Structures are given as structure tokens and as C-alpha cells.
Image (cartoon, rainbow, N blue to C red):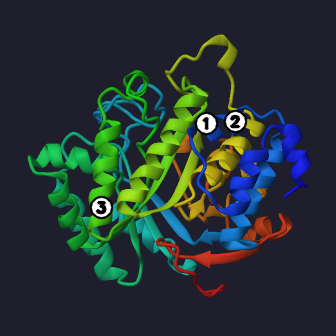
Amino acid sequence: MFAPDYYNICGLLSIYEKVKAGERLDFEDGMVLFNCPDIAAVGSLALHARCRLHGDAAFYVVNRQINYTNVCVNRCVFCAFRRDAESDDGAFTLSVEDILARLRACSLLHLDELHIVGGCHPSLPLSWFENLLRIVRSGYPDLPLKAFTPVEIAHFARLEGISTLQVLRRLKAAGLVMMPGGGAEIFDEGLRPQLCPHKADAKDWLRISGEAHSLGIKTNCTMLFGHLESLEQRVDHLCRLREQQDRSGGFTCFIPLPFLSENSALKLPEAQRGPVHGLDQLRTVAVARLMLDNIPHIKAYWIMLGAKTAQTALWYGADDLDGTIVEEHIGHMAGADSASGMTIRELESMIRLSGFSPVRRNAVFETLESGR
């Protein structure tokens, strides 16, 4: 960190003192950080918090993403991935054999995470997903299965006419160990209906995450930013995640997701049009690291940030880059121009060239030996 006088000039002295002492920041502190004109000062505080937790380690995972369908009943306004029906141009739904073929194609990678997520399909029953997890687990018993957002869990429960807790119990019995954090978007009750009026609301998203935690299922959490939300709504979102973590303790990693507007139906005001700029992305990563004192990891998701910004984000509080991925549709259909996957060598080189030490992990952030 810089000298105290520097933070005093920037209006961050009280926040500096809290960060140095390891004390929790409040909502007003979050607003001050977002409004501070000196992003270097904000970043230095986040770097201190990051290094206190993880030293110079930067994590990555050898993983394979599989999006099983983009047919979805939720009709989220911002989403460029979803299709409303199987007959729509670009719609797809994979079979179990399709998914297994994609797994077999990755046999040389020795995967440490399988990431399965998709749209809320109108007719795929919960038993289809249970069967999928059991087949994958039988063929790959040591491969951790990370699958299904709280939004998907709510959808499965509606289709089955059972509780979300029952859904989670059945999926855990089938092999689920971790859940991604998608679908959180922005929690604000006034704004959320403008973005995603038909999907699980903020209360349900947080409740389902807590239910998963109660069963020992770890989860990630996210925030979609850079669209219609205000800075106050960003800070509110972070505070609600922190409060849920205080209650249930199962969030492993937070992923800030910049809104990619290129192929979205969401129309932004003239002043907001165009991609979220890199400095705002870095500031949001930094504020998240400082506000989310009880969530251990902050991810710089290179697919949506781009490789260069993700590398820089390691100096602004992030400690994880996600992984090899292999094939990704959601971000790229929204306009991401990054590669669809990276090799282990490329990821480790990214980390080393950024000045950090690469650490290989699995889906639940257990450290693994490099070169597995």
C-alpha cells in the first residue's frame, strides 16, 4: 500500500485504516471506493487484501465447460445466449452422448473440473440431469462435477413440483459437489424485473444458495455489471452476498461479469452504449475484493474480461483466472472476442508474466500438484 498521506489526499484514509486493520467496510465505504478518482489508490488497497489472503498465488483450473442447451423459458432481456424454442435459429440441446463425446475428447487434459450449465429448458426433467451426473461420475469417478446455477435449481423444482431443497438433495446424491454462481445478475428489486422478469428473484437466488451450503455443496456467486445498474445497486449487491455468506458460509469465489452488449436486446441509454471500459472492470474487481471480506476468492474471468484485463486484474484484487475451459458459448454469443479455451502452458504463462505464481486447483479450490 501507499503511505497514509496518499490515501488522505484521495479521501480514502479511513478505508485505508480499516483495510490495514482487517476491519469490515460498510456500504458508504463501497460508494467512496467506486467514486474515488484515483483508481491506483483503490487498486493498491485491493492488492493488499488479496495478498494477505493468498500471497503471490494465482489460481487456475484444468476444466471443460459444457453448455447443454440454450433453449430457455426465462426470456432475459440482456441474454444473447438463449433461444425461446428448439425451432429457433441457433438453438441447440445436447444429448447425454454428445456430452460424453466432449468429455472423451478432453482425455489428454486430465480434467480437474467439469462445468455444466445451460438454459432453463421447458421439458428436460430432473431425472435427465440425475442420469447425466451418474453416468459421468461412473466413467470419471475422480472428476469433480460443478453444475447448475440457483436459477436452474428453481426451474427444476417448478417442473417437478417439489422444493428446491429436494432438488439439491437429489443432485447431490447423483454426484454434484459444486455449483456455479450464474443468474445473480443484479439483486435490486426495482431493476431486476427490467433485466430478467421471469427467473428466480434475488430472495430465491440467495435462499437456494444457502440451501446448497447447508448440504455441503459449495457455490460461486456473480454480479452482472455495466448495464442499467447504478453504483449504489452494485454495492448493495455485494453487501447482500456478504450477508448471505455470513449466514451460510458456502460461497467459494465471486465472479464480476461485465455486460457484453454487442448481441443483446437490452437497449442502453446513449451515454452507456459500448462495452464496459477496462478501468471500470478493474475498479469493480477491486471493490469486490475489499467488500467481500468473507469470500476467499475473486475471479478475473478471462473469457469476458479478455486476457490482458484479466492479467491486470490480478493486481486489483483478483486471485483466480478460471481455467482451460475448452469451449464456451454464453459469453461468446454475447460478443466476447476472447479465445474459446487456453492451454495449461498459456494460463501459467499469463500468470507468471503478470508477476504471480501459478497454482493449479480443482473445482472446490483444493490445491493440486502442477503438471498432473
Q: Position of residue 346 (x, y in %)?
A: 74, 67
Rendered image: mark on residue 159? none
**SS for callout 3:** helix
Residue drawn where x is 76% and y is 62% of the image: 48
Q: Position of residue 120 (x, y in %)?
A: 29, 42
Marks 2,1: beta carbons within 8 A: yes
Q: Position of residue 46 (x, y in %)?
A: 72, 54
Q: Residues within 10 Å of mark 3 (few under 14, many from 20)?
A: many
Residue 172 visible in the picture? yes
Q: Which residue is under mark 3?
A: 212
For residue 366, above or below residue 264:
below
Disc 1 is placed on an element classified as helix
- To which quarter of the image does residue 176 belong? bottom left
Q: Earlier in the sequence, mark 1 or mark 3?
A: 1
Q: Amino acid at mark 2?
A: Val
The residue that disc 2 covers is 32
Is residue 295 shown left or right of residue 128? right
Measure how far apart labels 2 and 1 are at the Cα level: 6 Å
Q: Which mark is residue 28?
A: 1
Judging from the image, what secondary structure is the residue with disc 2 in?
helix
Q: Residues within 10 Å of mark 1 (few under 14, many from 20)?
A: few
For label 2, the crowd category at 10 Å Cα-Cα, with few meaning under 14, some 14 to 19 and many 20 or more, is some
Check the picture and name the quadrant holding the C terminus.
Answer: bottom right
Q: CA distance from mark 1 to mark 3?
A: 31 Å
Label 3 and label 2: CA atoms lie apart by 33 Å
Q: Nearer the viewer, residue 25 or 50?
A: 25
The correct choice, above or below, for 64 with respect to 84 in the image is below
